[in-house]
Image (cartoon, rainbow, N blue to C red):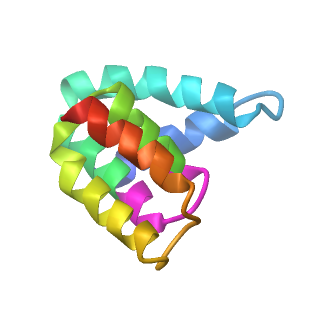
Amino acid sequence: MSKEEVLAEFDRDITNQGYKPDGNIIYRIIFQHAAQLILTDRLGVIDALRYWLLLRDDPFTVFAINLIQDLVIKELKPDLEKLRNDIESRNTLLPYYNEWVDRALKAIS
């Protein structure tokens, strides 16, 4: 699968709910799907999460950070470090987002 196909799958996970779930429920749904997809299409999942990191937009960036942590995707460590530096230099997001980034970096190190 390509990045676009993985993102489309995740988008369906978000929009196919018969109700408006909160962020935690959406995350659990995406996590379950990503955990399956990463076994067969690691590169597609990595590229999709890299895209979400580059959006610098909550909730997608936070979803990506948490998925990287929970699925232990070491390939995205440089991307997390770049995000951390951008947050620290106040180029994007608020400083408290680095708590999530630091947790993810620790988990994949």
- Tell me where residue 94 sits by quadrant: bottom right
Q: Does the magenta stretch include residue 65?
A: no
Residue 1 appearing in the image: no
Name the one closer to the observer, 98 or 53. Answer: 98
- With 55 as the anchor, is 70 left or right in this view? left
Q: Say which residue appears at 47% left-offset and 26% top-offset.
A: 31
* 64 relative to 71, above or below: below
Residue 96 in view of the camera: yes
Image vertical order of residue 103 relative to residue 72, above or below:
below
* 13, 28: nearer the viewer: 28
Residue at 48% over, 46% down: 99
Where is the C terminus found, in terms of image quarters? top left
Which image quarter holds the N terminus? top left
Task: Give the main secondary structure of the magenta stretch.
Answer: helix
Q: How many labels does the image show?
A: 0
Q: Where is residue 30 in the image (x, y as percent from the top left)?
A: 51, 30
- Residue 29 lies, in percent from the top left, at 56, 24
Give the percent coordinates (x, y) of residue 35: 35, 22
Q: Give the range drawn in magenta.
A: 51-61
Above or below — where is 59 with respect to 32?
below
| Quadrant of residue 108 within the rendered picture | top left
Q: Which residue is drawn at 40% across and 58% down?
A: 53
Q: 42 or 85: nearer the eye?
A: 85
Quarter of the view holding residue 65 = top left
Q: Position of residue 9 (x, y in %)?
A: 47, 39
Q: In this view, does 14 lie to the left or right of 103?
A: right
Report the residue at 33% width, 68% height from top: 85
